[in-house]
Every structure is written in C-alpha cells, then in structure tokens.
Amino acid sequence: MIQFSEEAMREYQKIVSHYPEKRAAVLPVLTLAQQEFGWISDEVAEYVGKLMDYPPSDMKSVASFYVLLRKKAVGKYHLEICRNVSCWLKGATQCMVEARRILGVEAQEITPDGLFSWDFTECLASCGTAVAMQVGDRYIENLTPEKMGAVIEQLRQEAVQK
C-alpha cells in the first residue's frame, strides 16, 4: 500500500486547510500525488480518494480531464517538448526527432534504465523563446536539436550524482 511521505503528508494537510471543503482541493492534492508517485495510477487514485473521502473513480475522473496529470508512468526525467505554432515554426519537430534518436524510444515510452521519457505538449507560454521544453519544474528555452543532446547529458550527469 502506498502512502505519502511525511513531508508530502504535511503538504497535503496544508493544502486542504486552505479550502472550505476537501472537494475543492482535489486538483492540488492530485498534483501533489503526482509529484510524490510520478503519475496517477489506480493505486494512487484509490489512496487519494480514501484520504479525501471520495471514491477513486472521482479522482480518476479529475485526472482524466486535466492534461497536466499523467495517466501512465514516465521516466524520472520526462521531457515535454512544445509543439504549438511558434515552437513548431522554430524547429520543435527536429527537436523531437533528436530526442527520439538520442534516447532510443518513441514518444510516451520510457528508456530501459527508467531515466527518460519524452512527449510533445501544447503551449508552454514561451513563444518568444521557442522552442520550449519542460522537464519537471524546469523550463528550457531556445531549444535546438544540438542543445537537446546537451540537456539530456546534463540530466544524465545529475542522475549519477544523486
């Protein structure tokens, strides 16, 4: 059975304390659960549902509506490459091709070592610095296929150091 770490449980209690009823906190709590567990699995939906006194189906319903909540596992470093108009015009497709080549996996697949996955996403609100990519809470701007390799290598080094 999964459960929040002590730190995440403190954050959960802080989140629900800001709302007049628990239902209003579902989205921020699911976001917290995704940070803690990586994605909203059936087990996570059940756990969060019990915490909040709602059926797991309610949690899964909310998760299925919001694209920011993942419905399947991703790598430790999940590269989300913007493909909206500005990014597309500035080379997002070539950046995706380079991610596929370097990592050896297709979009929505995880590398065998579990470190990386990638996918496209819609607007990251960085049109002036396109191509944009998000990795967790980090934003990489002015991305090029050449820079993609450097970013991935930096993330690999970071994983080794942890």
Image: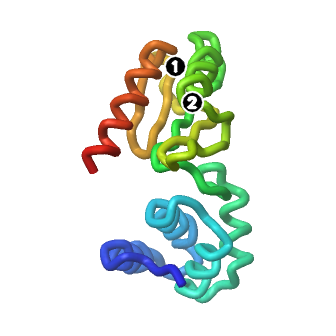
Location of residue 2 in the rendering, given as x and y in whole percent from the top left corner: 51, 80
Q: Residue at x 52, y 59 (%)?
A: 38
22 or 96: nearer the viewer: 96
Q: Does the CB distance between marks 1 and 2 fall below 8 Å? A: yes
Q: Is residue 120 above or below residue 112?
A: above
Q: Which mark is residue 103?
A: none
Local crowd at mark 2 within 10 Å, few (<14), some, or many (≥20)?
many
At numbered mark 1, what does the secondary structure look like: helix, strand or loop? loop
At numbered mark 2, what does the secondary structure look like: helix, strand or loop? strand
Q: Viewed as shown, does residue 33 lie left or right of 13?
A: right
Looking at the rendering, in which quadrant would you find the N terminus? bottom right
Examine the rendering and report whether any part of residue 45 can be seen. yes
Q: Residue at x 45, y 13 (%)?
A: 146
Task: Give the quarter of the image for residue 30.
Answer: bottom right
Q: Is residue 148 above or below residue 7?
A: above
Amino acid type for the residue under numbered disc 1: Val
Amino acid type for the residue under numbered disc 2: Ile
Task: Report the number of numbered marks.
Answer: 2
Task: Give the quarter of the image for residue 155.
Answer: top left
Q: Residue at x 49, y 30 (%)?
A: 133
Identify the residue at the far left of this view.
161
Q: Residue at x 45, y 39 (%)?
A: 135
Q: Which residue is mark 1?
A: 131
Separation of disc 1 and disc 2 at Cα? 8 Å
The mark nearer the N terminus, 1 or 2, is 2
